[in-house]
Amino acid sequence: MYRGAASAEYTRYHDEEWGRPLHDDHKLFELLVLEGAQAGLSWATILAKRKAYQDAFAGFDPAKVAAFDEAAVEALLAEGSGVVRHRGKLASAVKNAQVVLELQREHGSLASFVWGFVPNCQPMVGSWSSMDQVPTT
């Protein structure tokens, strides 16, 4: 176990959130933003900055984030913003918000789009008694 995995944020995330199905567009967008920020960093690092991300990204409201202009991105790049100050990661969050709005228009919600790839829109839960029963594809 690496050091960050012992943090309270990491433990709470693992025990209460990780692997749980989500159908809320704001929460799905939050994970999209946080996963994008995490690239090349530890998840514990991002979880420690989660509150700053919530504040910086308007509570992960895709409509508000989609309207961010260059000045808003520059403000996030400033020291003390509390988020990972990487222009590409911040710009991708804004672009992803714009795409989320398109998906909401086309599919009714981001959740409908995402869950549309899952049979019956339900997570697959395995209760296998042997490894031979576990699907390989």
Image (cartoon, helix red, strand yellow):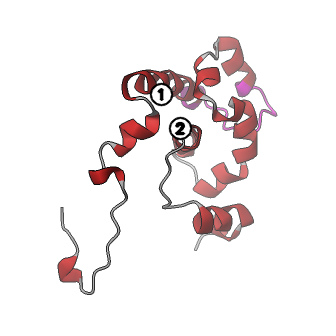
Q: The residue under label 2 is which amino acid type?
A: Asp
User: Percent x, y for residue 81?
Assistant: 78, 32
Per the picture, the main secondary structure of the magenta-coloured stretch is loop
Question: For mark 2, what is the residue?
Answer: 25
Q: Residue at x 68, y 31 (%)?
A: 57
Total number of numbered discs in the rendering: 2
Q: Is residue 78 magenta?
A: yes
Name the residue: 67% across, 33% down: 85
Name the amino acid type tagged 1. Val
Query: Residue 51, can we see it?
Result: yes
Q: Residues within 10 Å of mark 1 (few under 14, many from 20)?
A: many
Which is more N-terminal, label 1 or label 2?
2
Q: Foreground: 79 or 25?
A: 25
User: Where residue 96 sits in the image (x, y, percent)?
Assistant: 49, 27
Measure the alpha-carbon separation of dots 2 and 1.
Answer: 9 Å
Write down the region rendered in magenta: 76-89
Circle on res. 100: 1
User: Residue 24 at x, y = what percent?
Assistant: 54, 43
